[in-house]
């Protein structure tokens, strides 16, 4: 009964209003998920002097938390061009890692654990916020409508099996992989089997939510050398159940619909944008105009690549680039390089 939404601005002209678009889409689906709401946004390309810095958001921290990062790099303070923002019980800051420091190194140093400190998001371009309550409450805390960037995904949640709190809310950052997040509607029925296997390999789970296992699965496939589109396609065989999920990355927007196609999902693509949502009302309310909305076919994994465009930050600007990003279900044998595979290192839950 949850609601999921995704939006990619191809033109770069809507970038400043992406937050407003996704908030309006979430508000239209508010009746599907009154328990919590969240948004993950891929922002513009960072300035050259911040190219190798991470934007990190953490929850359940204390005043000594960042002292644990000494020796791993440096916190970039606002006066040096970094970000430092506290809101909704979370802290967002900029961190420049030392050479050879991995995302896993940082999470271990912070002491990230279930029920304790949690890294909600990490990446050069990703920011992710979520909380218990409605989309309107999310807006009141984080001013999501003012966020800018080419791509975002979002979620409204109705809890059917697991608890209602920050950790169990969505989106989920894919731990260990910069700039990668997921949202999910439905049920992964072989969740327990997949979780036991991952835990035996050292994975930390932060929830009892079956949705969490999707990111763990994608990370595992990336570590095995699969591209992100390939990993999404693989999940059609390896994840059981009735579900749809969306993926936000610095390279583009992913859409996966299980082999049964029972869960509702509606997709629209124009020369200016790609938008996807659980119900069509979310598209029409946020993006008025004359365009066709269709259901993606069952057993499909589609990836809209921003990297094939002249500018990742701007989206596709010319007809050739637009043509290159038409939705085509990605076969398992497809071969598309994805930098997240190289970024993932080391080991990495229900709706």
Image: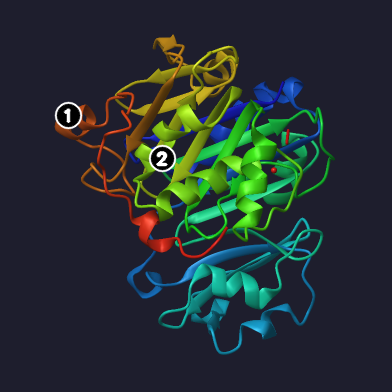
| Position of residue 279 in the picture relative to residue 51 (left or right) | right
With respect to residue 112, does 183 lie above or below? above
The front one of 327 and 144 is 327
Within 10 Å of disc 1 (Cα), the crowding (few <14, some 14-19, many 20+) is few
Q: Is residue 143 visible?
A: no
What residue is pinned by disc 1? 319
With respect to residue 291, does 169 lie above or below? below
Q: Is residue 39 visible?
A: yes
Circle 2 sits in a helix, a strand or a loop, which is it?
Answer: helix
Q: Position of residue 307 (x, y in %)?
A: 27, 46
Q: Position of residue 44 (x, y in %)?
A: 40, 53
Picture residue at 56% right of the left edge, 34% below the top: 22
Picture residue at 49% right of the left edge, 51% below the top: 219
Disc nearer the start of the sequence (2/1): 2
The front one of 205 and 72 is 205
| Position of residue 149 in the picture relative to residue 307 (left or right) | right
Marks 2/1: CA–CA distance: 28 Å
With respect to residue 238, does 310 lie above or below? below
What residue is pinned by disc 2? 231
Q: In the image as oriented, which residue stretches furthest toward the left? A: 320
Picture residue at 39% right of the left edge, 35% below the top: 9
The front one of 80 and 133 is 133
With respect to residue 121, does 38 lie above or below? above
């Amino acid at each position: 009964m949850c609601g999921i939404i995704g939006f990619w601005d191809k033109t770069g002209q809507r970038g400043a209003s992406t937050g407003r678009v996704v908030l309006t889409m979430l508000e239209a689906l508010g009746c599907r998920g009154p328990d919590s709401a969240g948004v993950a946004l891929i922002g513009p390309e960072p300035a050259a002097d911040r190219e190798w810095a991470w934007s990190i958001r953490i929850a359940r921290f204390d005043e000594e938390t960042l002292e644990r990062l000494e020796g791993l790099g440096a916190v970039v303070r606002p006066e040096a061009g970094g970000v430092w923002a506290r809101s909704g019980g979370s802290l967002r800051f900029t961190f420049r890692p030392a050479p050879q420091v991995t995302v896993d190194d940082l999470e271990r140093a912070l002491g990230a654990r279930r029920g304790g400190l949690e890294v909600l998001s990490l990446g050069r371009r990703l920011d992710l916020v979520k909380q218990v309550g409605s989309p309107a409450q999310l807006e009141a805390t984080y001013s999501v409508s003012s966020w800018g960037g080419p791509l975002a995904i979002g979620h409204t949640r109705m809890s059917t099996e697991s608890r209602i709190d920050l950790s169990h809310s969505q989106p989920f950052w894919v731990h260990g992989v910069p700039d990668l997040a997921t949202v999910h509607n439905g049920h992964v029925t072989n969740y327990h089997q997949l979780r036991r296997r991952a835990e035996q390999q050292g994975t930390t789970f932060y929830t009892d939510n079956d949705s969490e296992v999707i990111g763990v699965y994608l990370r595992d496939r990336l570590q095995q050398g699969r591209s992100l589109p390939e990993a999404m396609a693989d999940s059609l065989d390896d994840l059981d159940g009735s579900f749809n999920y969306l993926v936000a990355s610095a390279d583009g927007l992913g859409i996966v619909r299980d082999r049964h196609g029972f869960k509702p999902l509606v997709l629209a693509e124009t020369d200016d944008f790609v938008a996807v949502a659980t119900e069509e009302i979310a598209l029409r309310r946020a993006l008025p105009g004359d365009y066709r909305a269709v259901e993606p076919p069952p057993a499909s994994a589609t990836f809209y690549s921003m990297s094939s465009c002249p500018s990742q930050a701007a989206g596709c600007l010319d007809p050739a680039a637009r043509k290159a990003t038409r939705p085509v279900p990605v076969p398992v044998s497809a071969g598309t390089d994805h930098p997240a595979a190289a970024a993932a290192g080391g080991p990495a839950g229900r709706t």
